[in-house]
Amino acid sequence: MSLFPLFLKLTGRPCLVIGAGNLAESKIESLLAANGRVTVIATAASPRVLELAAGGDITLHLRPYAPGDVHDVFLVVTATDDPAVNRAVYQEAVSKHVLCNAVDDPPFCDFYFPSVVRRGDLQIAISTAGASPALAQRLRKEINAALPLDTGDWLTDLGNLRREVVAAEPLNEARKLFLHQLAQREVCGFDQCPSRTLAREHARNNPLPHSPSASEPTS
């Protein structure tokens, strides 16, 4: 099976989770981390899920799933300990063209939750299409151990510097190659950072069309 990898914007989108035990807890946390608007339906809830509900982070309905619950939602995750319930949720989601993930039941999933390594805005997602979550977790641990802890801070500085370059230079092959060069250098936030100095020199040599040329007076 060939999967299409993407990173999905969930900010403000309604997400439904059926179940509130250990299986569901991590999925709820993942949806909240992406700023999804989460509603949970379950007959019982773990202490952490109850805490999230008490804090107003999620909407919790303590009752069984009922047909019709998959309504006006962007995606649904079903993570009960009853396979029949999970598959009923999936079938309802399919009938309403809603993306669904039945946890630990790959044939009844439109998408999978990958193992993720995070450093600030950097995310590295690993999926085995449900074939071996254990392998995905092992690879996540290996990548996590190899990736410097300050990579997120470095990415923030690199992003700021990229915006400066994009604002100062026209879109062309030279700018594209230079941005790739910056991504291989150490970028830092202070004004005299070597990469920042290099970026200013590059901008002077590749001015925007409306900027003064090198032969025009600047005073």
Image (cartoon, rainbow, N blue to C red):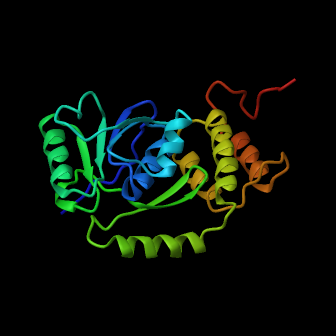
Residue 145, horizontal then vertical, whole percent: 59, 74
Looking at the rendered structure, the number of numbered marks drawn on it comes to 0
In this rendering, position of residue 29 left or right of residue 205 = left
Name above or below for residue 11 compared with residue 88: above
Can you say which quadrant of the picture contains the N terminus?
A: bottom left
Residue at position x 75%, y 44% in the image: 200
> Is the residue 21 above or below the residue 53 in the image?
below
Which one is in front, 86 or 167? 86
Where residue 202 sits: x, y (%)? 70, 46
Residue in view at x 27 percent, y 58 percent: 81
Q: Quadrant of residue 23?
A: bottom left
Q: In the rendered view of the protein, which quadrant contains the C terminus?
A: top right
Residue closest to the eye, 183 or 173: 183
**In the image, 185: left or right of 64?**
right
Q: Where in the figure is residue 149, as x and y percent of width and height? A: 67, 64
> Most extreme residue toward the right, as rendered?
219
Image quarter of residue 82:
bottom left
Q: Nearer the viewer, residue 60 or 175?
A: 60
Q: Position of residue 27 (x, y in %)?
A: 40, 51
> For the point 64% across and 33% down, which residue is it?
167
Q: Nearer the viewer, residue 85 or 14?
A: 85
Decide: is 151 above or below 75. below
Side (left or right) of 143 relative to 156: left
Q: Residue at x 59, y 51 (%)?
A: 179
